Image: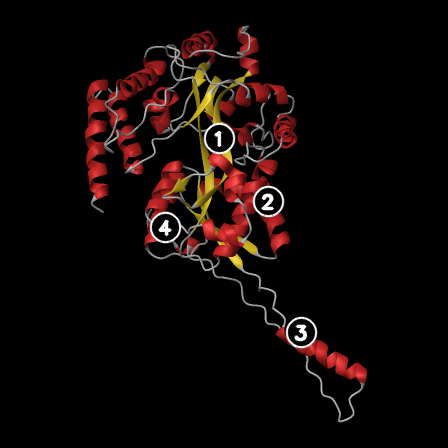
Amino acid sequence: MQGFKKSWALISLSSVVGLSLLSGCGSATTTKKETGAAATAATSSTAPKKADPVTLSMFITSASQKEWDDGSPNDKIKKQWEAKSGNKLELNILPGTLDEAMKKIDIAMLSGDKTDIINLSNPIDQNKYASRDFLYPMKDLAKQANYDIDKIYGDSLTKYKDEVYYIPYNLSMWAVFYNKKLFDEAGIPYPTGKWTWSQYIETAKKLTNPAKGIQGSYMLTFDNYLYMQARQKDVPGYKADGTSNYDDPAYKDALKWYNDLSAVHKIQPSWIEFKTKKLSNLGFLEGKYAMQFIGTWYLGSLNNFDKYPRDWKWGVVQPPTPDDGKGNNNIGVTAALGINKKSAHPKEAFDFLSYFAENSYKERGEFPAQKNLSKDDMNAVLKNIADKSQGSVTSDDLRKALLDNGLGFTQEKLLGSAMSEYSNIIMQESELYFAGQKSVDEAVKSIKTREDQAIQAASKQ
């Protein structure tokens, strides 16, 4: 990612705490008591020394700095680990947006930076960092720590060439979150149970009120929105020969469908409007949008009424499915933490990663990535989220929408060669379509052609 500034240069390690041993002198007529003391001293001098405390460093973005402020959920987890381990964690703050910060980390990895821990919230970055040999392999670290990483995380754990390079700390499944106040004012019943995207659109139309500046839907400028319906149908992003599969009709249909939400149905801001007006990723919390389709990572913000005060309660319902009945899948992703391959303290870093991953959901009010939780543990997760919602939802609401909905599950991103380029190409070409500079057919054809070129270039590296 880009050049460094002095303010986020390498964080120095803590100084080593020296240990001193007392030695005693005995006379020619040593007593039994003195002999015992001498033996104890001798034993102490040969006993294994307790490891000196170390200070780890972790990259975070300036945009996410508030999430680590004193008293925040992340800060509580950090302090709990510090008290347990005796070690310290310092934050290496990168200026700019998430994308800008990740570009800086790219440059840092290539230049030999030794910042210990990297937050990889996007599977594209996860795959890229593992494939570029930026990350420390964790199988042996887990074995040394007697930590059954496979049992704990199950299918939430992503491996690269049968090695583990990052530990997931939350599982984000998608759902529709809605503003109960706007539904009540419009006299529209809350959505429940199974429904289709056509029903979602019709509901959003009833809730849209231009005179009051209210729109029925809100979707962000993430690449996976543009091919979301293809992912629900589990259409692969790559062909068997490794080339792009974007010429599958499902991707054209998904792109046109997304554009129609604003261009035809007028139920949400367009991609271009979102960009030019610099609309917020947290715009739903402003109270002018009735529904938002997004991952459960959003629960942390929804339930943060101190940071995002509002006079309305929110609800949740399972994702709509394609109208043709094909692709009844939820989509999702895991956020993860990795260890820099250049880290001087991989064992201590792994200890922090495993602690954060197992305790994050308890403080952050998100869904855990662990698959070994008991029914009581999962009930506690749901209750924790419901309790933080200030009466917005119940545990049963969350269970029906997210766990007992009868939907399958598939990865939200297109995982494979040249993933980062794939994402950028999709957004660039799609934006030309949204701006009227290309037809949907031209955009899809360009995505296929450019990604195949990127895949071929990657194979030669």
Q: Position of residue 103 (x, y in %)?
A: 34, 45
Residue under label 4: 134
* 4 or 3: tag closer to the N-terminus: 3
Q: CA distance from mark 4 to mark 1?
A: 25 Å
279 in relation to 33, above or below? above
Looking at the image, tell me whether mark 1 or mark 2 is earlier in sequence order: 2
Question: Which residue is tagged 2?
Answer: 77
* Tag 4 secondary structure: loop
Where does residue 209 sit, x and y in percent of width and height?
Answer: 45, 10
Residue farthest along the bottom direction in this orientation? 28
Q: Residue at x 32, y 48 (%)?
A: 132
Give the CA distance from mark 3 to mark 2. Answer: 35 Å
Q: Residues within 10 Å of mark 1 (few under 14, many from 20)?
A: many
Near mark 2 (Cα within 10 A), the count class, few <14, some 14-19 or many ≥20, is many
Of circles 3 and 2, the one toward us is 3
Q: Earlier in the sequence, mark 3 or mark 2?
A: 3
- Amino acid type indicated by mark 1: Ser
User: Mark 4 vs mark 1: which is more N-terminal?
Assistant: 4
Left or right? Give the position of 172 relative to 453: right
Left/right of residue 420 with respect to residue 321 in the rendered view: left
Res 181 quadrant in image: top right
